[in-house]
Image: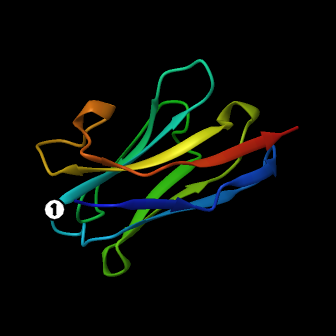
Amino acid sequence: QVQLVESGGGLVQAGDSLRLSCTASARTGTKYDMGWFRQSPGKSREFVAAITVSGRDTKYGESVKGRFIASRDNDKNTVYLQMNSLKLEDTAIYYCAAALVVLGLPTTPNLYNYWGQGTQVTVGS
């Protein structure tokens, strides 16, 4: 069982930056790819980013490509999501998730085994 705790959310202005963190209760550095998803009211959960166990490979959703950066520190059992040039439409609850390593980075929620409770990000004009 892996417990994930997100932090770093808050209220920012459009154009600002914010960094989310997700700390795991167990070592994820050898077994789990990590992902970030977001969900806003009335919408389905959207893929944001994913990063491999080693941290060498990443994948991003089209709406955040070029603005968000995923990274991880396996010594700290922590993954990060650096969010730059934030837009109003980035407002959502952001979730981190862990997936047992499979071939290719998973981008759909059903392929992830463990989820955090989410952290709210609100972008104002």
Looking at the picture, tell me which residue is in the foreground, 84 or 43.
Answer: 43
**Percent from the top left, x then y, of residue 55?**
30, 63
**Percent from the top left, x then y, of residue 70?**
45, 56
Is residue 34 shown above or below 46? below
Q: In terms of secondary structure, where does tag 1 sit?
A: loop
Name the residue at the bottom extreme: 75
Looking at the picture, tell me which residue is in the foreground, 9 or 84.
Answer: 9
Q: Residue at x 25, y 54 (%)?
A: 33
**Percent from the top left, x then y, of residue 74?**
31, 74
Q: Residue at x 28, y 61 (%)?
A: 56
Q: Quadrant of residue 3?
A: bottom left
Dividing the image into 4 quarters, which one contains the N terminus? Answer: bottom left
Label 1, residues with CA under 10 Å away: few <14, some 14-19, many ≥20: some
**Percent from the top left, x then y, of residue 102?**
12, 45
Q: Is residue 26 left or right of residue 95?
A: left
Dividing the image into 4 quarters, which one contains the C terminus? Answer: top right
Name the residue at the right extreme: 125
How many numbered discs, if any?
Answer: 1
Q: Amino acid at mark 1?
A: Lys
Q: Quadrant of residue 93?
A: top right
- On the image, numbered disc 1 is attached to which residue? 31
Q: Residue at x 84, y 40 (%)?
A: 124
Q: How is the image coloured?
A: rainbow
Is residue 63 shown above or below 80? above
